[in-house]
Amino acid sequence: MAHFRKLRLTAAFFVLIFCAAALLQAPVCRAELREMADTDLSAVYATGFSNFNLTGNVARIDLNNFTTSTWTEINSLKTGYYTKGTAGWDNDWTNVSLGSATTDLVANGLFIEAKFTNITDAGTRTLDYLRIGTPNMQGEISGNFNSFSGSITTSGVTTSYSRLPLNGGAATTINSSGGFYFSLERTGANMGFQFVWENATKTP
């Protein structure tokens, strides 16, 4: 059985870059706690920010009406070092850019999704996968993809990769206008750390 031994840059950090970008855009301000009158509280309502759904063995949280944008540069991004045939990284990216100097990488909405086996039985329940991403991402991610695991769907055609360099590891730009997520798969052919673009093109 494979063991995941190292994770230099966690999935949570990669996705939370979007969240940090949104928070950093907020102006600095001071606030104090003040009691609200019942008449004030009766006029307050909120809807549509988040949804939780449990369908079969799949639990999902959607953060709606949540848009973040960023241009972030990362020297090295590595996920999933363990033995899979041979020891190595599921993903080994260098000189990574999320967005560009002219166009931000934009995420419209965020989600967390988990699939279980026997979700209702605490004694036998196991986690099959955990996914963190956005249902709609626009912009580009570029870098040297020395090792890549995941899939890219272009015009309805999906190409899957398992620890393969994209274009020989040369600098690659991926332009996306659809869903994007990072996944930790515990079982099946895609076991390991995966990046998935649901609608994208890559160059060269």
Image (tube, rainbow, N blue to C red):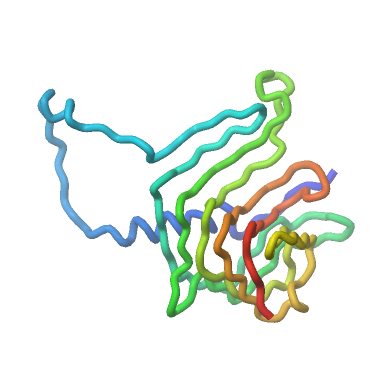
* The C terminus - image quarter: bottom right
Q: How many numbered marks are there?
A: 0
Q: Is 127 situated left or right of 37 in this image?
A: right
Q: Which residue lies most toward the front here? A: 155
| Residue 126 drawn at (x, y percent) | 71, 30
Q: Is 80 situated left or right of 55 in this image?
A: right
* The N terminus - image quarter: top right
What residue is at 62 percent from the left and 37 percent from the top? 114
Q: Quadrant of residue 151?
A: bottom right
Q: Is residue 10 visible from the viewing direction of this image?
A: no
**Is 56 drawn above or below residue 186 in the view shown?**
above
Judging depth in this view, the residue of 11 and 179 nearest the camera is 179
| Residue 43 drawn at (x, y percent) | 17, 30
Q: Is residue 20 visible from the viewing direction of this image?
A: yes
What residue is at 44 percent from the left and 79 percent from the top? 101
**Is 145 drawn above or below residue 80 in the view shown?**
below
**Is 96 drawn above or below residue 66 in the view shown?**
below
Q: Which residue lies most toward the right here? A: 85
Q: Quadrant of residue 33?
A: top left
| Residue 108 drawn at (x, y percent) | 45, 55
Q: Is 87 situated left or right of 30 in this image?
A: right
What residue is at 58 percent from the left and 70 percent from the top? 175
Judging depth in this view, the residue of 126 and 176 nearest the camera is 176
| Residue 95 drawn at (x, y percent) | 59, 76
Judging depth in this view, the residue of 204 and 126 nearest the camera is 204
What residue is at 48 percent from the left and 76 percent from the top? 100
